[in-house]
Image (tube, rainbow, N blue to C red):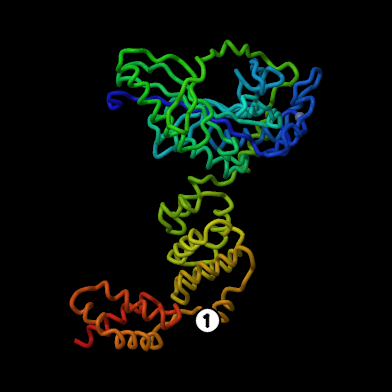
């Protein structure tokens, strides 16, 4: 049924910036403090308290704007968005309305360009905790934590693209180093607008799903919402403009409230803060400081190191891992060695970026030239995470070198002599039995036999005797 409809999706993403202090006061902006300990008269909205803008917030927002190909405004201003809610003690949020800091960018997701309408800065609200006994507790620590809101154009078409868009934004913010983007801690939250219409007809009424906190949930919420709206329309009813929430227990969306209009917020210019005026030098300096972003890093890895696209994606999960991989790869000179390095790093898992890059490269080289097994290499890398061992001496002192050539031949000859049944099986075409012989060689050599070479030798032995 959904096949006869097209979906139009736009996403507002709220990202908490990783600054030390809050956006308008000197309270700590860190996550996880004892409730209501990181507050002051300014972020609590006491009468007479005056805000001062944190320059780092502007810098980080400009970085995000440049990374997302936006125009950066040389003149922007702050506005008050007025509404009452218990988590907002001032009864207004300082945000940006008519003149945001950044406008008109884009991000490429899976070969499609998704437009960015705007990026503005604003303050976060406090956090409500609804207790089981019906009481609600409030933690004001989050009041005044700096946010950027990134508003996409309604260019997204599918649930997968919605997830891909947010995960693309997340990756860029991580590489810029301006946010932790931890969706489980709420430092990245998405409001998703969904409407459906028949091809050729005008866009349908949009419904907003608020505060979705995982990429998987975004995809599920959009998928459910598309099918819900299509069945409403198919049954001859109309979609009402409303705000819904995602229910992760049954993967559906449910009504929160009917939609408020922008005019309900009575935006007006913030009288306590001057406009933000940015010199072109300031913006250009920031532009020059932007690190290489994941898309470019992947392209470089594929062209310079010859690794596959899949490996490139798996390495570019964090700037720290990329920096480590770059340093280690620089110590190697063949593309094959770098691919071995890449696989070893991924096998070694979390924390590998703490290892010594040079020793890691040496380990990869030893695997690549057949001196040690991947299994031994993985063990060495896991040790390197926490201590700086010398890999070459460890290989020697622990006797890790693989057994090759004539030495290996002895083990193979013994294994073939000792298991006539396996040999007969292989001769009669039951090739699986070769595993048994390799296993015997491995056991006899204390796991140091080169498995590939052993297999070749076993075949030579068996078929030479014919
Ligand atoms: Zn404060």
Location of residue 378 in the rendering, given as x and y in whole percent from the top left corner = 51, 67
User: Residue 312, can we see it?
Assistant: yes
Is 256 situated above or below 308? above
Where on the image, by quarter, is ligand 1?
top right
**Residue at horizontal 52 percent and vertical 37 percent from the top:** 169
In this view, 400 is above or below 334: below
User: What residue is rendered at 38% in x and 18% in y?
Assistant: 203
Residue 92 placement, left or right of 422:
right
Q: Secondary structure at mark 1?
A: loop
Quadrant position of residue 458? bottom left
| Rendered location of residue 312, percent (x, y) | 45, 53
- Residue 30 left/right relative to 295: right
| Left or right: residue 312 compared with residue 260 | left
Q: Quadrant of the N terminus?
A: top left
Image quarter of residue 431: bottom left
The crowding category of the residue bearing disc 1, from other C-alpha atoms within 10 Å (few below 14, some 14 to 19, many at least 20), is few
Q: How many marks?
A: 1
Of residues 227 and 152, the one nearer the viewer is 227
Residue closer to the observer: 206 or 136: 136
The residue that label 1 is drawn on is 399
Horizontally, residue 41 falls left or right of residue 67, namely: right
The answer to whether any part of residue 152 appears in the image is no
Q: At x 49% / y 39%, what residue is drawn?
A: 167
Q: Is residue 148 above or below residue 230?
A: below
Q: Percent position (x, y) of residue 254? A: 46, 23
């Amino acid at each position: 049924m959904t096949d006869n409809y097209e979906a139009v999706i736009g996403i507002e993403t709220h990202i908490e910036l990783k600054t030390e202090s809050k956006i308008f006061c000197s309270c700590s902006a860190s996550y996880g403090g004892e409730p209501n300990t990181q507050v002051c008269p300014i972020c609590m909205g006491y009468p007479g308290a005056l805000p001062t803008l944190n320059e780092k917030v502007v810098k980080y927002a400009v970085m995000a704007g440049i990374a997302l190909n936006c125009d950066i405004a040389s003149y922007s201003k702050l506005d008050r968005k007025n509404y009452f809610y218990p988590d907002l003690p001032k009864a207004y949020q300082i945000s940006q309305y008519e003149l945001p800091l950044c406008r008109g960018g884009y991000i490429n997701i899976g070969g499609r360009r998704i437009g960015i309408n705007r990026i503005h800065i604003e303050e976060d609200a406090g956090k409500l905790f609804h207790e089981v006994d019906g009481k609600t507790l409030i933690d004001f620590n989050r009041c005044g934590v700096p946010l950027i809101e990134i508003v996409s154009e309604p260019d997204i078409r599918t649930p997968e693209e919605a997830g891909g868009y947010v995960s693309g934004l997340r990756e860029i913010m991580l590489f810029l180093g301006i946010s932790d983007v931890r969706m489980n801690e709420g430092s990245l939250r998405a409001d998703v607008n969904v409407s459906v219409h028949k091809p050729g007809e005008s866009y349908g009424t949009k419904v907003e799903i608020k505060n979705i906190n995982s990429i998987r949930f975004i995809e599920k919420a959009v998928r459910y919402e598309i099918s819900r709206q299509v069945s409403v329309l198919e049954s001859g009813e109309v979609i009402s403009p409303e705000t819904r929430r995602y229910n992760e227990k049954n993967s559906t969306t449910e009504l929160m409230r009917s939609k408020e209009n922008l005019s309900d917020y009575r935006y007006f210019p913030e009288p306590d803060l001057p406009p933000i005026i940015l010199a072109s030098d300031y913006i250009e300096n920031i532009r020059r400081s932007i690190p290489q972003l994941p898309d470019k890093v992947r392209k470089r890895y594929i062209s310079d190191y010859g690794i596959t696209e899949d490996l490139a994606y798996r390495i570019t999960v964090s700037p720290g891992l990329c920096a480590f991989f770059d340093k280690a790869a620089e110590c190697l000179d063949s593309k094959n060695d770098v691919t071995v390095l890449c696989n070893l790093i991924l096998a070694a898992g979390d924390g590998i970026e703490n290892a010594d890059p040079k020793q890691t490269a040496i380990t990869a080289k030893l695997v690549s030239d057949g001196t040690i097994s991947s299994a031994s290499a993985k063990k060495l890398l896991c040790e390197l995470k926490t201590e700086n061992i010398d890999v070459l001496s460890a290989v020697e002192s622990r006797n890790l070198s693989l057994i090759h050539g004539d030495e290996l031949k002895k083990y193979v000859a013994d294994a073939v002599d000792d298991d006539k049944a396996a040999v007969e099986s292989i001769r009669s075409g039951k090739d699986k039995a070769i595993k048994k012989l390799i296993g015997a060689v491995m056991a006899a050599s204390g796991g140091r036999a080169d498995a590939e070479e052993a297999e070749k030798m076993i075949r030579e032995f068996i078929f030479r005797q014919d």
